[in-house]
Amino acid sequence: MNFLSPYAFWLAVTLPIVLVFYLLKRRRKVQVVASSMLWRKFLAETQASAPFQKLRHHWLLIFQLLILALAILAMARPYFSGNVSEGGLLVVIMDTSASMQSTDVPPTRMDAAIKEAGDLIDTLSDTDQMMILAAGRQTRVLQSATSEKNKLQRALKSIEASDTSTYLLDAFKLARTLAEGQKLAEIHLFSDGAASDLNKFEPTDLNISYHPIGTRSDNVGIVSLDVRPNPDDETTRAIFAGVVNYSTNRADLIVELQWNDQTIEARPLELEPGSTDSQVFIAPQSENGIFSLKLNSDDDLAIDNQASVVSLLPKPARILLVTRGNRFLEKALSSINNIELTAVDQLTDASPDVDLVVLDKITPLAWPAVNTLAMHVTHTNWIESANTVESPVIVDWKAAHPLLRFVQLDDVQIAETLEVKTPNWAMSVVESTRTPLILAGEKEGQRMVWTGFDTLQSTWPLRISFPIFIANAVEWLNPMTSQASMVNVRTGDAMIATLEETGSNPVMLLPDGQKTSVIANPGSRQVIFADTLRQGIYRLQNGSTEVVFASNLADASESDNGPREELNLGGYSQVTRTGQKRADLEIWRWLVLAALIVLMLEWWYYHKRTA
Amino acid sequence: MDPEGYEEGLKALLGRGFHVHVILVLSREELEPNVYGDLKVVDSESGTVQEVTFGKYRLKAYQKTVNAFLEQFKNFCRKRAIGFNLAPSDTDLDQLLLSDLRKAMLWK
């Protein structure tokens, strides 16, 4: 026999209390009478009709102890394993995104969702099972399927709203997998519905209940923040910010720009309901640092009233060109702004003091350990080729890839190319019918762009797309560019850094001031830090060096925090508000508790009356 | 009162040719007890102790016992032409001597 609520055995402490009352009761009061004859007669008559006379004095005690013990046993909910009709499975999805921090339902929507889900737990019957999923950046199973309400309530109370966007799709996919094969399965979503990814989810025949949380939309938020070099003045930076008013009232507020926590500009902003405003700030920058934008808005959601961006000073990209002579390539490289170009005819040093290396048909004696643009070159560790393909025809290219921005390849003809298979580290960005022509990827922190053909054996250098491609490749391969894009991340996304020093133990200083150690893979200089659920500044400290990251929510769908009465799932399905389902609510615990109280009161009253 | 009962004593008196009249004096507490709870009843004559658990809910049963005892006593006396008077201990003595016993023809 097992017990669903073994904690009820703590009530066994009341058994000695009954005994104490009983012992107190047995103190007899002396009464002197003229003759005890009548009392003896009385006792003789009543005893004559009472069975178990020996137990007479203790019967009350035994009876009451028995009631008490049975009541405690009942409250412990004993059960035997056996075969009963199958209960249902309820999969509860708790939205833990940033918008759940809204305070329109005090104290927060998250607390209101937890309370409402707690009420749902109370409606579970003994054969029902429930599991709880927290839908944050990753979906976590907080409690696997169980009918133990204590465990479920504990799991529920451990939930906190994060600073991330809503990612309900993964949670729904997981819930669907769990619900499959169950005869009676329900999915309960507790959310404000601020989710943009649900149109990719086809609910099929799932039984989904939506419990919307929240009452109103009263929020002004920063939905984008970016910093770029000012094209008019290289010593200054341009900070672009998008601010949206999602409330139904006009917003009058102050936008404040800070540089390393010092306010450098504040300007008033008036926003009509539903309107968006793009603000551009021009600020001088003499060193690497952080621009922060703050809104002094007293709205329901505080997290999007602030955003930060790490701004790194642009440095000239140092390029080492290894070639026996390629005028087109040299011209394309030298036309790029802010570079330092050096040309050599052989590479002997594996770690040249440059930002990137361009290999033009020369296999180096030592393969470079920096980012590389390799043209018509093979290497055992990176790419191998045994055959060539004559006159490959370009059939497809990935126009969305940064390398191919503004690049058109329709009019390019190629005489010959190396035949390769796309290696694990790379993706094919330009393809012919038989073989990839251009590959791009990253291995152990080192980026590489590979072209399989000799550009001089093609018409490409004569096309405008060639210098554009070379400029794109230099920007993509420049460590400063990749670092600048990697130090500014969305909340919940991983922070990736390449350590300059190895051997020491890197430590991440979190936005709340706490420190946590970061484990770097042995033999690798790359560290990945994924615990970025909070918005703010993260500092990776490693020996004497420090890499600063900014993590921002900056998500319009989170800032638009008005509760949705219905959710659109997939292309055609809708889920609307669900009330509490009808259920048989157990009240036996309260009855047993009342019985215990009555029992104690009876003892107390009896003791008082006979004292 | 003799714990063995009143019968043998009264019969002995009648056998010797006495004219007997019983005046049974009982305290009010014996007729209608008003002390409840777990009692240790001490007989003031014999000193014997009787443990009793008594409550209001047993009052009727007790009074039934007392009434049955008195009825039995009266019957015993009636059969033997013994006069019988119940005198609760708070009875007015003048009332008992000048009225009740005179009515019972104990004296004129």
Image (spheres, coloured by chain):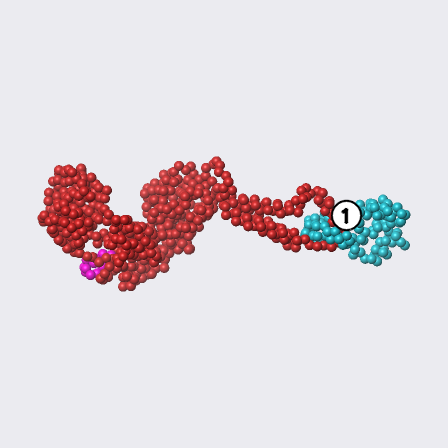
Chain colours: A red, B cyan
Task: Describe the element under mark 1 as helix, strand or loop.
Answer: helix
- At 12% from the left edge and 49% from the top edge, which residue is drawn? A346
- At 20% from the left edge and 61% from the top edge, which residue is drawn? A235
Closest to the observer, B100 or A366: A366
- At 86% from the left edge and 47% from the top edge, which residue is drawn? B12
Give the magenta range: A227-237
Q: State left or right for residue A310 relative to residue A318.
A: right
Q: Does the magenta stretch include residue A228?
A: yes
Percent x, y for residue A571? 32, 42
The amino acid on which the numbered mark 1 sits, given as a three-letter code, is: Asn
Percent x, y for residue A177? 37, 40
Choose top left, top right, bottom left or bottom right for residue A240.
Answer: bottom left
Q: State left or right for residue A350 relative to residue A65.
A: left
Q: The disc numbered 1 marks a residue on which chain?
A: B
Percent x, y for residue A140? 37, 46
- Report the quarter where the C terminus of chain A lies: bottom right
